[in-house]
Image (cartoon, coloured by chain):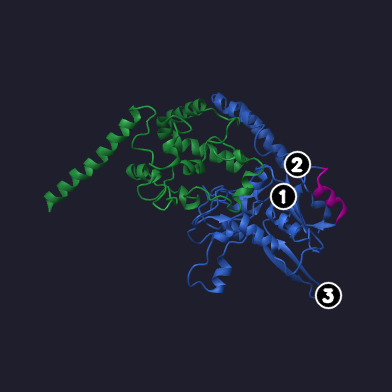
Chain colours: A green, B blue
Amino acid sequence: MRSSTGIKRIITGLIPGGLLAVLSMGVMSEPATVGVVTPGSKAASSEACVAPTEEMRRNHMDYLKHDRIEVVYKGIRDTEFGLSSCVECHAAKDDKGGYLPINGKGQFCDSCHEYVAVSLPCFQCHRKTPAEQGASGDSAMTGSNPHRLGLLQSGGGQLTLSADELRRLHVMTLEK
Amino acid sequence: MGKHDDQLDMKRREFIGKTVLAAGAATVAPGILLTVARAANETRGVTSAVRWGMLIDTNKCADDCTACVDACNKENGIDLVQRPEGASDADWNAQRPQWIRKVKLRDMATQVVTTLPMMCQHCEYPPCVDVCPTGASFKRADGIVMVDRHICIGCRYCMMACPYKARSFIHQNVENQLVAVPRGKGCVESCNFCVQRIDAGNTTTACQEACDKAGHKAILFGDLKDPESEITRAFKTHNSRQIRAELKLNTGVRYIDV
């Protein structure tokens, strides 16, 4: 009994260890997407995320929180970062071509969040798959300019805080 | 009902708010970054130079028409909330989310029947905001009262406080939400004047659009602070009133002939 749990421990220790190795390899190589980005997703074919991968890994939660305040309280919807854009790019498709929920077992959000044991409540309310074309409501949201929505599409949109400023803000907050 | 209490825009709180904000900006000082952020934001986003409101002409509201309710359900993905299996009519009708309800009034003396759409009245002094223990219920600078679902704990105190029964609680898990209108079990929600449309530069709500399309034109949405807007001009020429005006909430939604 005791020996079997010991073996289990070793095995369970090996799995995250291996995952960590994969993750750290990803950090070292540029542009660092190996083994992390979901194969078959839109993100797999793009050069980099909206910010360098290591920056996104460290700070995505702050970027999202900062911009959610812009959206909800100030009505600024062409923010640089947004959860819908994460979903848009990182969602994988199943065999039949339908999108898989991004927080599903082993999917992009879930894989890391489960590993670090950080709960992921975003998708209790937010949509887990990219929007279907012509869905009701969403069409009105983008209005006359469909490019207003979403971080990758923000184009020449003026940003309130640059990524660098936001990083400094983040460091300041951590030091407090 | 005292007409003199019935101001569209009471300036006092706004003035005090701005004074406090100005003093705050000076004393926060070490965060140079913070002041930079504020300055950059001032030209963007919602402003208190606008106050969104609505004028509803009950004479034009048809008894058997639910165009506004249907359009609202579609625009805001309310129709994605499915009736739970085995739920009785009474349960479902009591618990389903509704942002607009058609209300029928009968004057017992004259038997005159009036129908009207009832939704969040977007009060200047919203009781739901007063009672919210987490600050999730809030009023945007442009007068839209809404819920920040990120911090709503689902206590439903606001539902108790609202004199208009405008708020709904989501009792079940929801799938395939609209990107623009996130929704999940455990939060309270209500009409937000189709905020996703307004932010995208649209000037009508889904309900007004549907009402116009149905040929009734009972709903007029617009900026109450713009002296040139259609709604402001309509206010001047029609005798409108707030529902429960005695509460002095200064609602953004007003009705003609109620």
Q: Residue A4 shows which numbered tag?
A: none
Viewer-nearest of labels 1 and 2?
1
Which of pointers 1 and 2 lies earlier in the amino acid sequence?
2
The three-letter amino acid code for the residue at tag 3 is Thr
Chain of the residue where label 1 is placed in the rendered structure: B
The one nearer the camera, B246 or A148, is A148
Question: Quarter-wise, where is residue B90 in the image?
Answer: bottom right
Q: Residues within 10 Å of mark 2 (few under 14, many from 20)?
A: few
Magenta run includes residue B235:
yes
**Residue B66 seen in the figure:** yes
Which of pointers 1 and 3 lies earlier in the amino acid sequence?
3
Percent across and percent down for residue A37 are 38, 38
Q: Residue B11 shows which numbered tag?
A: 2
Q: Residues within 10 Å of mark 3 (few under 14, many from 20)?
A: few
What element does badge 3 sit on?
Answer: loop
Instruction: Report the magenta residues as a range.
Output: B227-238
B25 vs B169: above or below: above
Task: Determine which residue is flagged by label 1.
Answer: B204
Task: Determine which residue is flagged by label 3.
Answer: B110
Overall secondary structure of the magenta stretch? helix
